[in-house]
């Protein structure tokens, strides 16, 4: 059973998620240090980058909320937020942001990794 990304994390720790399809999942999960590759996003009004969200795998209408096709929500990676990601085009205060990006490839070391796997909403 996939790890929801919540177990073992403190109640004060904010988790960030990256969603992807099966091919993306296999590529990222095959490495001990997760590397999220920056690329041109599906929405052309968003900048080049690797994209993340604070929306958990069980969020209702996840694909719509984060602006991706539903196929891209099948697999997820969860990790501890370091506050080093940029918010995506909004004027909301940082603590209310839902979508973030890195303009360059983004690596997550083992000590920050909190879970990954198939989204339980798909099974």
Image: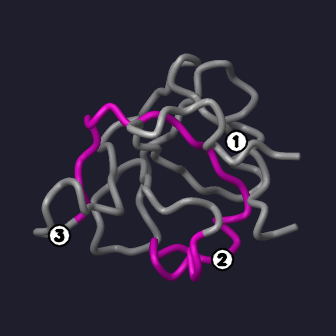
Quarter holding the C terminus is: bottom right
Q: Which residue is mark 1?
A: 116
Q: Is residue 81 magenta?
A: yes
Element type where label 2 sits in the image: helix
Image coords of residue 74 (percent x, y): 73, 63
Q: Earlier in the sequence, mark 1 or mark 3?
A: 3
Q: Is residue 107 left or right of residue 78?
A: left
Element type where label 1 sits in the image: strand
Residue 90 disc label: 3
Q: Is residue 41 left or right of residue 60?
A: left
Q: Earlier in the sequence, mark 3 or mark 2?
A: 2
Mark 2 is surrounded, within 10 Å at the Cα level, by few (under 14), some (14 to 19) or many (20 or more) other residues, namely: some
Does 68 sit above or below residue 86? below
Does 6 sit above or below residue 62? above
Residue in front for this viewpoint, 45 or 78: 78
Image coords of residue 41 (percent x, y): 43, 63
Residue 12 occupies quadrant: top left
Q: Earlier in the sequence, mark 1 or mark 2?
A: 2
Looking at the rendering, the stretch of residues picked out in magenta corresponds to 59-88
Q: Nearer the viewer, mark 1 or mark 2?
A: 1
Q: Which residue is mark 2?
A: 70
Q: Is residue 15 left or right of residue 2?
A: left
Residue at 23% of width from left, 48% of height from top? 86
Q: Is residue 22 magenta?
A: no
Say if mark 1 contacts mark 2, CB within 8 Å. no
Image coords of residue 110 (percent x, y): 58, 18
Does 110 sit above or below residue 118? above
Say if mark 1 contacts mark 3, CB within 8 Å. no
Residue in front for this viewpoint, 50 or 39: 50
Q: CA distance from mark 1 to mark 2?
A: 17 Å
Element type where label 3 sits in the image: loop
Q: CA distance from mark 3 to mark 2?
A: 23 Å
């Amino acid at each position: 059973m996939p790890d929801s990304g919540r177990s073992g994390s403190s109640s004060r720790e904010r988790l960030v998620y990256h969603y992807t399809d099966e091919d993306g999942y296999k590529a990222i999960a095959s490495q001990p240090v997760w590397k999220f590759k920056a690329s041109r996003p599906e929405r052309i009004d968003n900048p080049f980058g690797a994209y993340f969200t604070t929306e958990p795998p069980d969020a209702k209408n996840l694909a719509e909320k984060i602006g991706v096709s539903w196929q891209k929500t099948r697999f997820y990676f969860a990790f501890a937020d370091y506050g080093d990601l940029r918010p995506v085009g909004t004027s909301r205060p940082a603590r209310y942001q839902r979508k973030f990006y890195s303009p360059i490839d983004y690596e997550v070391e083992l000590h920050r990794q909190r879970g990954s796997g198939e989204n339980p909403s798909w099974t």
